Image: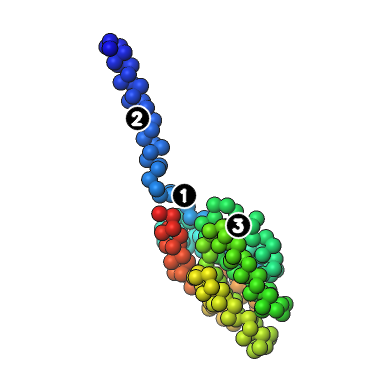
Amino acid sequence: MSFKASLLHFIVMFTLCFAVIPAAAQDTGGRSEPIQLVGFGDSLMAGYQLAPPESYTAQLEAALKAKGHDVAVTNAGVSGDTTSGGLSRIDWSVPDGTDGVILELGANDALRGISPEQSEKNLDAILARLKERNIPVFLVGILAPPNMGGDYAERFNPIYKRLADKYEIPLYPFFLDGVTTVEGMQLDDGMHPNAKGVSVMVEKTIQPVESFLGEIKAKRK
């Protein structure tokens, strides 16, 4: 082989090697993109009458990032939504590529006096659908309002624990813990949290959400 041919062969091989390195470096078995969470729920998730940065999903994302997590939390909350409404939109509201869902529904069912058995059936169907899609779920519970009576509460309140046990998923029992009946935490309607109330909700849920992220990260490996 002539000197020129040898030099050309060297240049070609040198170029090919360095061209392959970036692709090979990416093929490490890990994923560098942010964890994609979807907050799926009703007005409590949507941030009723709040500015977008004040919603639960926005405040949660900011809090998680401040703790060093590479995460994006999409707001898929719809004010007024029931478990039935959530079931009807679960497929298109949770896009492909979602790494985990924070599921919060049922408050409007209780306010409207919908049969707890029907609410549980709807939530069960939502969880089954997400399981079919291999999307992990962090379930958030709601308690029936006192004005619905003790019998209704006894039928409604255990729904979330039963479903969490059935699907072996993490559960936060009461989304409005630390906010309901606490002065200065609600909007004028006395039902929905204000921005300060949402910050309390984030503070109380961030540790179990971090544990949920840990499960997702372990699944990615």
**Real-space Cα separation, disc 3 to disc 2, in angstroms:** 41 Å
Give the amino acid type for the residue marked by disc 2 in the picture.
Answer: Cys
Determine if residue 44 is in view: no
Q: Who is closer to the viewer here, 205 or 135?
A: 135
Identify the secondary structure beneath mark 1: loop
Identify the secondary structure beneath mark 2: helix
Q: Looking at the picture, how far across and down is residue 199, in whole percent?
A: 52, 69
For mark 3, what is the residue? Answer: 94
Give the amino acid type for the residue marked by disc 3 in the picture.
Answer: Val
Q: Residue at position x 38%, y 38% from top? A: 24
**Real-space Cα separation, disc 1 to disc 2, in angstroms:** 26 Å
Q: Earlier in the sequence, mark 1 or mark 2?
A: 2
Q: Looking at the picture, how far across and down is residue 45, in whole percent?
A: 60, 66
For mark 1, what is the residue? Answer: 33
Q: Looking at the picture, how far across and down is residue 95, in whole percent?
A: 60, 54
Quarter holding the C terminus?
A: bottom left
Q: Residue at position x 51%, y 74% from top? A: 165
Identify the secondary structure beneath mark 3: loop
Q: Who is closer to the viewer here, 59 or 121?
A: 121
Q: Are marks 1 and 3 in contact (CB under 8 Å)?
A: no
For mark 2, what is the residue? Answer: 17
**Real-space Cα separation, disc 1 to disc 3, in angstroms:** 18 Å
Q: Residue at position x 53%, y 65% from top? A: 137
Give the amino acid type for the residue marked by disc 1 in the picture.
Answer: Glu
Q: Is residue 56 left or right of residue 151?
A: left
Q: Earlier in the sequence, mark 1 or mark 3?
A: 1
Q: Residue at position x 31%, y 13% from top? A: 5
Determine if residue 204 is in view: yes
Q: Is residue 99 above or below residue 102?
A: above
